[in-house]
Protein backbone atom coordinates (compact mmCIF):
# COMPACT_ATOMS: atom_id res chain seq x y z
CA UNK A 1 0.00 0.00 0.00
CA UNK A 2 1.20 3.51 -0.76
CA UNK A 3 1.75 5.77 2.23
CA UNK A 4 -0.65 8.68 2.33
CA UNK A 5 0.70 12.19 2.82
CA UNK A 6 -0.14 13.96 6.06
CA UNK A 7 -2.51 16.97 5.80
CA UNK A 8 0.50 19.26 6.33
CA UNK A 9 2.66 17.63 3.63
CA UNK A 10 -0.27 17.51 1.22
CA UNK A 11 -1.08 21.19 1.85
CA UNK A 12 2.58 22.21 1.45
CA UNK A 13 2.81 20.37 -1.88
CA UNK A 14 -0.44 22.01 -3.00
CA UNK A 15 0.84 25.46 -1.95
CA UNK A 16 3.94 25.05 -4.10
CA UNK A 17 1.73 23.90 -6.99
CA UNK A 18 -0.37 27.06 -6.54
CA UNK A 19 2.76 29.25 -6.56
CA UNK A 20 3.92 27.40 -9.69
CA UNK A 21 0.56 28.23 -11.32
CA UNK A 22 0.98 31.88 -10.30
CA UNK A 23 4.33 31.77 -12.08
CA UNK A 24 2.34 31.36 -15.32
CA UNK A 25 0.59 34.73 -14.94
CA UNK A 26 3.59 36.50 -16.46
CA UNK A 27 3.83 33.94 -19.28
CA UNK A 28 0.17 34.38 -20.13
CA UNK A 29 0.58 38.16 -20.00
CA UNK A 30 3.34 37.84 -22.59
CA UNK A 31 1.22 35.57 -24.81
CA UNK A 32 -1.94 37.71 -24.69
CA UNK A 33 -1.81 40.35 -27.44
CA UNK A 34 -4.26 42.90 -25.95
CA UNK A 35 -3.25 45.93 -23.88
CA UNK A 36 -2.94 45.77 -20.09
CA UNK A 37 -6.30 47.39 -19.25
CA UNK A 38 -8.51 45.16 -21.49
CA UNK A 39 -6.47 42.12 -20.39
CA UNK A 40 -7.13 42.77 -16.69
CA UNK A 41 -10.77 43.70 -17.40
CA UNK A 42 -11.40 40.28 -18.95
CA UNK A 43 -9.46 38.52 -16.19
CA UNK A 44 -11.63 40.22 -13.56
CA UNK A 45 -14.88 39.52 -15.42
CA UNK A 46 -14.26 35.78 -15.82
CA UNK A 47 -12.75 35.34 -12.34
CA UNK A 48 -15.69 37.14 -10.71
CA UNK A 49 -18.23 34.94 -12.50
CA UNK A 50 -16.39 31.78 -11.43
CA UNK A 51 -15.98 32.89 -7.80
CA UNK A 52 -19.62 33.97 -7.46
CA UNK A 53 -20.82 30.64 -8.91
CA UNK A 54 -18.44 28.78 -6.57
CA UNK A 55 -19.62 30.84 -3.57
CA UNK A 56 -23.25 30.12 -4.47
CA UNK A 57 -22.54 26.39 -4.84
CA UNK A 58 -20.66 26.15 -1.52
CA UNK A 59 -22.95 28.66 0.23
CA UNK A 60 -19.89 30.72 1.20
CA UNK A 61 -20.38 33.84 3.28
CA UNK A 62 -19.95 36.93 1.09
CA UNK A 63 -21.00 39.53 3.65
CA UNK A 64 -18.51 42.18 4.77
CA UNK A 65 -18.43 44.65 7.64
CA UNK A 66 -19.98 47.98 6.58
CA UNK A 67 -17.32 49.92 8.50
CA UNK A 68 -14.62 48.18 6.44
CA UNK A 69 -16.07 49.07 3.06
CA UNK A 70 -13.87 52.18 2.50
CA UNK A 71 -10.78 49.97 3.05
CA UNK A 72 -12.26 47.29 0.79
CA UNK A 73 -12.77 49.88 -1.95
CA UNK A 74 -9.14 50.97 -1.54
CA UNK A 75 -8.07 47.32 -1.74
CA UNK A 76 -10.07 46.84 -4.93
CA UNK A 77 -8.52 49.90 -6.54
CA UNK A 78 -5.06 48.72 -5.45
CA UNK A 79 -5.44 45.25 -6.99
CA UNK A 80 -6.78 46.73 -10.25
CA UNK A 81 -3.85 49.15 -10.49
CA UNK A 82 -1.39 46.40 -9.46
CA UNK A 83 -2.52 44.01 -12.22
CA UNK A 84 -2.60 46.74 -14.89
CA UNK A 85 0.90 47.99 -14.04
CA UNK A 86 2.18 44.39 -13.80
CA UNK A 87 1.05 43.53 -17.33
CA UNK A 88 2.03 46.94 -18.66
CA UNK A 89 5.56 46.38 -17.33
CA UNK A 90 5.66 43.02 -19.15
CA UNK A 91 4.52 44.67 -22.38
CA UNK A 92 7.22 47.37 -22.27
CA UNK A 93 10.08 45.27 -20.84
CA UNK A 94 10.30 41.51 -20.24
CA UNK A 95 8.65 38.91 -18.01
CA UNK A 96 11.92 38.22 -16.18
CA UNK A 97 12.51 41.89 -15.33
CA UNK A 98 8.93 42.37 -14.14
CA UNK A 99 8.94 39.26 -11.93
CA UNK A 100 12.34 40.12 -10.45
CA UNK A 101 11.07 43.56 -9.44
CA UNK A 102 7.82 42.09 -8.13
CA UNK A 103 9.77 40.17 -5.48
CA UNK A 104 10.34 43.55 -3.79
CA UNK A 105 6.67 43.52 -2.81
CA UNK A 106 7.38 41.63 0.43
CA UNK A 107 9.88 44.31 1.42
CA UNK A 108 7.47 47.15 0.60
CA UNK A 109 4.91 45.38 2.79
CA UNK A 110 7.43 45.40 5.65
CA UNK A 111 7.73 49.18 5.26
CA UNK A 112 3.98 49.77 5.00
CA UNK A 113 3.03 47.59 7.98
CA UNK A 114 4.51 49.97 10.60
CA UNK A 115 2.47 52.83 9.12
CA UNK A 116 -0.77 50.83 9.12
CA UNK A 117 -0.26 49.08 12.45
CA UNK A 118 1.40 52.15 14.05
CA UNK A 119 4.70 50.64 15.16
CA UNK A 120 8.31 51.73 14.76
CA UNK A 121 10.45 50.59 11.83
CA UNK A 122 13.16 48.30 13.18
CA UNK A 123 16.87 48.67 12.45
CA UNK A 124 16.88 45.41 10.48
CA UNK A 125 14.21 46.80 8.13
CA UNK A 126 16.40 49.86 7.45
CA UNK A 127 19.36 47.57 6.63
CA UNK A 128 17.19 45.49 4.32
CA UNK A 129 16.05 48.72 2.68
CA UNK A 130 19.65 49.63 1.88
CA UNK A 131 20.24 46.14 0.47
CA UNK A 132 17.08 46.37 -1.63
CA UNK A 133 18.16 49.74 -3.05
CA UNK A 134 21.52 48.20 -3.97
CA UNK A 135 19.75 45.27 -5.69
CA UNK A 136 17.49 47.57 -7.69
CA UNK A 137 20.46 49.76 -8.68
CA UNK A 138 22.23 46.66 -9.95
CA UNK A 139 19.15 45.74 -11.99
CA UNK A 140 19.01 49.22 -13.53
CA UNK A 141 22.69 49.12 -14.47
CA UNK A 142 22.53 45.55 -15.81
CA UNK A 143 19.48 46.00 -18.07
CA UNK A 144 19.93 49.02 -20.34
CA UNK A 145 16.84 50.37 -22.08
CA UNK A 146 14.38 48.90 -19.55
CA UNK A 147 14.44 51.59 -16.86
CA UNK A 148 10.77 52.50 -17.46
CA UNK A 149 9.76 48.84 -17.23
CA UNK A 150 11.68 48.44 -13.96
CA UNK A 151 10.09 51.60 -12.49
CA UNK A 152 6.57 50.45 -13.46
CA UNK A 153 7.23 46.93 -12.10
CA UNK A 154 8.49 48.34 -8.78
CA UNK A 155 5.39 50.54 -8.54
CA UNK A 156 3.32 47.41 -9.21
CA UNK A 157 5.16 45.66 -6.36
CA UNK A 158 4.34 48.60 -4.07
CA UNK A 159 0.64 48.35 -5.00
CA UNK A 160 0.75 44.59 -4.33
CA UNK A 161 2.20 45.30 -0.88
CA UNK A 162 -0.49 47.90 -0.17
CA UNK A 163 -3.17 45.39 -1.18
CA UNK A 164 -1.66 42.70 1.10
CA UNK A 165 -1.39 45.03 4.11
CA UNK A 166 -4.99 46.23 3.65
CA UNK A 167 -6.23 42.65 3.55
CA UNK A 168 -4.11 41.84 6.60
CA UNK A 169 -6.26 44.27 8.57
CA UNK A 170 -9.56 43.09 7.04
CA UNK A 171 -9.22 39.31 7.20
CA UNK A 172 -9.72 39.20 10.97
CA UNK A 173 -13.15 40.82 10.71
CA UNK A 174 -14.47 39.53 7.37
CA UNK A 175 -14.67 36.19 5.50
CA UNK A 176 -11.91 35.71 2.91
CA UNK A 177 -14.38 34.99 0.10
CA UNK A 178 -16.39 38.10 0.96
CA UNK A 179 -13.25 40.27 0.87
CA UNK A 180 -12.12 38.83 -2.46
CA UNK A 181 -15.46 39.12 -4.28
CA UNK A 182 -16.02 42.67 -2.99
CA UNK A 183 -12.52 43.84 -3.96
CA UNK A 184 -12.58 42.16 -7.38
CA UNK A 185 -15.98 43.73 -8.03
CA UNK A 186 -14.60 47.19 -7.16
CA UNK A 187 -11.59 46.49 -9.39
CA UNK A 188 -13.88 45.44 -12.25
CA UNK A 189 -16.13 48.51 -11.90
CA UNK A 190 -13.13 50.87 -11.76
CA UNK A 191 -11.56 49.33 -14.87
CA UNK A 192 -14.91 49.44 -16.67
CA UNK A 193 -14.98 53.20 -16.05
CA UNK A 194 -11.36 53.57 -17.18
CA UNK A 195 -12.01 51.47 -20.31
CA UNK A 196 -15.02 53.54 -21.29
CA UNK A 197 -12.74 56.62 -21.51
CA UNK A 198 -9.56 55.01 -22.90
CA UNK A 199 -10.47 52.06 -25.13
CA UNK A 200 -14.27 52.13 -25.30
CA UNK A 201 -16.34 49.34 -23.76
CA UNK A 202 -17.12 47.58 -27.03
CA UNK A 203 -13.49 47.70 -28.13
CA UNK A 204 -12.43 46.39 -24.71
CA UNK A 205 -14.94 43.53 -24.90
CA UNK A 206 -13.94 42.49 -28.42
CA UNK A 207 -10.19 43.23 -28.22
CA UNK A 208 -9.01 39.61 -27.59
CA UNK A 209 -8.33 37.72 -30.82
CA UNK A 210 -8.13 33.97 -31.51
CA UNK A 211 -5.73 32.42 -28.93
CA UNK A 212 -6.17 35.38 -26.58
CA UNK A 213 -9.49 33.94 -25.40
CA UNK A 214 -7.83 30.68 -24.36
CA UNK A 215 -4.97 32.44 -22.53
CA UNK A 216 -7.36 34.84 -20.76
CA UNK A 217 -9.58 31.90 -19.82
CA UNK A 218 -6.62 30.07 -18.28
CA UNK A 219 -5.52 33.25 -16.50
CA UNK A 220 -8.96 33.81 -14.97
CA UNK A 221 -9.73 30.18 -14.09
CA UNK A 222 -6.48 28.44 -13.14
CA UNK A 223 -4.31 31.42 -12.09
CA UNK A 224 -7.01 33.47 -10.36
CA UNK A 225 -10.19 31.66 -9.24
CA UNK A 226 -8.74 28.14 -8.69
CA UNK A 227 -5.49 29.38 -7.15
CA UNK A 228 -7.34 31.68 -4.74
CA UNK A 229 -9.79 29.02 -3.59
CA UNK A 230 -7.02 26.45 -3.02
CA UNK A 231 -4.72 28.97 -1.29
CA UNK A 232 -7.47 29.65 1.25
CA UNK A 233 -7.95 25.92 1.86
CA UNK A 234 -4.27 25.18 2.55
CA UNK A 235 -4.18 27.88 5.23
CA UNK A 236 -6.10 25.46 7.47
CA UNK A 237 -2.89 23.41 7.78
CA UNK A 238 -0.06 25.85 6.99
CA UNK A 239 1.15 28.80 9.05
CA UNK A 240 1.15 32.29 7.48
CA UNK A 241 4.97 32.18 7.54
CA UNK A 242 5.09 28.97 5.48
CA UNK A 243 2.61 30.41 2.98
CA UNK A 244 4.59 33.67 2.70
CA UNK A 245 7.89 31.85 2.24
CA UNK A 246 6.36 29.68 -0.50
CA UNK A 247 4.97 32.71 -2.36
CA UNK A 248 8.49 34.20 -2.44
CA UNK A 249 9.36 31.45 -4.93
CA UNK A 250 6.90 32.80 -7.53
CA UNK A 251 9.51 34.98 -9.31
CA UNK A 252 11.88 31.99 -9.50
CA UNK A 253 9.25 29.76 -11.09
CA UNK A 254 8.11 32.58 -13.38
CA UNK A 255 11.61 33.45 -14.64
CA UNK A 256 12.43 29.78 -15.30
CA UNK A 257 9.12 29.31 -17.13
CA UNK A 258 9.74 32.48 -19.19
CA UNK A 259 13.15 31.14 -20.25
CA UNK A 260 11.58 27.80 -21.21
CA UNK A 261 8.71 29.36 -23.22
CA UNK A 262 10.31 32.44 -24.80
CA UNK A 263 13.95 31.34 -24.95
CA UNK A 264 16.52 33.97 -25.94
CA UNK A 265 14.03 36.83 -25.65
CA UNK A 266 14.09 36.32 -21.86
CA UNK A 267 17.84 35.71 -21.46
CA UNK A 268 19.32 38.54 -19.38
CA UNK A 269 22.88 39.56 -18.49
CA UNK A 270 24.83 38.07 -15.58
CA UNK A 271 24.39 41.33 -13.66
CA UNK A 272 20.62 40.99 -13.90
CA UNK A 273 20.63 37.50 -12.37
CA UNK A 274 23.00 38.65 -9.60
CA UNK A 275 20.71 41.59 -8.79
CA UNK A 276 17.56 39.44 -8.97
CA UNK A 277 19.13 36.73 -6.77
CA UNK A 278 20.26 39.35 -4.25
CA UNK A 279 16.77 40.86 -4.15
CA UNK A 280 15.07 37.47 -3.70
CA UNK A 281 17.67 36.43 -1.12
CA UNK A 282 16.99 39.58 0.91
CA UNK A 283 13.24 38.90 0.82
CA UNK A 284 13.69 35.30 2.01
CA UNK A 285 16.20 36.34 4.70
CA UNK A 286 13.85 39.09 5.88
CA UNK A 287 11.03 36.52 6.09
CA UNK A 288 13.21 34.20 8.19
CA UNK A 289 14.24 36.97 10.58
CA UNK A 290 10.66 38.17 10.92
CA UNK A 291 9.36 34.63 11.51
CA UNK A 292 6.96 34.61 14.48
CA UNK A 293 8.69 33.35 17.60
CA UNK A 294 5.56 31.64 18.88
CA UNK A 295 5.31 28.02 17.88
CA UNK A 296 2.63 27.53 15.25
CA UNK A 297 0.82 24.25 14.87
CA UNK A 298 0.91 23.23 11.23
Image: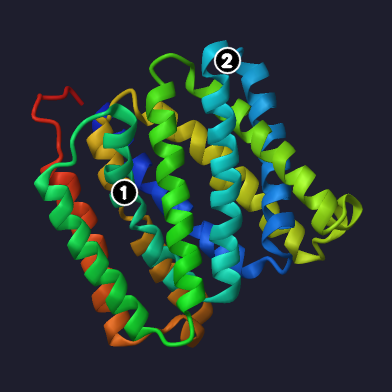
Between disc 2 and disc 1, the foreground one is 1
Packing grade of label 1 (10 A; few <14, some 14-19, many >=20) is many
Q: Residue 69 appears in which quarter of the rendering?
A: top right
Local SS, label 2:
loop
Report how many numbered discs are placed on residues in the image.
2
Q: Residue 271 appears in which quarter of the rendering?
A: bottom left
x 31%, y 35%: residue = 115
Query: Compared with residue 74, is residue 94 higher up or lower down, i.e. above or below?
Result: below
235 displayed left or right of 120:
right
51 displayed left or right of 282:
right
x 24%, y 63%: residue = 132
267 displayed left or right of 214:
left
Residue 213 appearing in the image: yes
Packing grade of label 2 (10 A; few <14, some 14-19, many >=20) is some
Q: Position of residue 61 (x, y in %)?
A: 57, 12
Local SS, label 1:
helix
Q: Residue 282 appears in which quarter of the rendering?
A: bottom left
Residue furthest out toward the right: 202
Q: Position of residue 91 (x, y in %)?
A: 60, 71
Q: Position of residue 163 (x, y in %)?
A: 46, 39
Question: Which one is nearer the viewer's eye here, 104 or 239?
Answer: 104
x 49%, y 17%: residue = 175
Q: Position of residue 165 (x, y in %)?
A: 38, 35
Query: Compared with residue 1, is residue 247 higher up or lower down, i.e. above or below?
Result: below
Q: CA distance from mark 2 to mark 1?
A: 29 Å
Residue at the spot of label 1? 106
272 displayed left or right of 231:
left
Q: Identify the image quadrant of the C terminus.
A: top left
Mark toward the start of the polypeptide (2 vs 1) = 2
x 34%, y 28%: residue = 235
Q: Identify the image quadrant of the N terminus.
A: top left
Q: Which mark is residue 60?
A: 2
Amino acid sequence: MTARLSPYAHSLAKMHFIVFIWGFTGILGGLISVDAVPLVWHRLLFALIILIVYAKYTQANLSVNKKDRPLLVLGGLAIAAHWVTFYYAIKISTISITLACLSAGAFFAALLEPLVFKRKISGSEVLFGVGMIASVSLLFSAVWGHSTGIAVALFSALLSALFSVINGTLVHRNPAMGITVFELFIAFVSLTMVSSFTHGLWETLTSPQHWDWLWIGLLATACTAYAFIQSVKVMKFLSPFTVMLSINLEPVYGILLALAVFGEAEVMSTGFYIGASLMLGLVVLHSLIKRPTARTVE
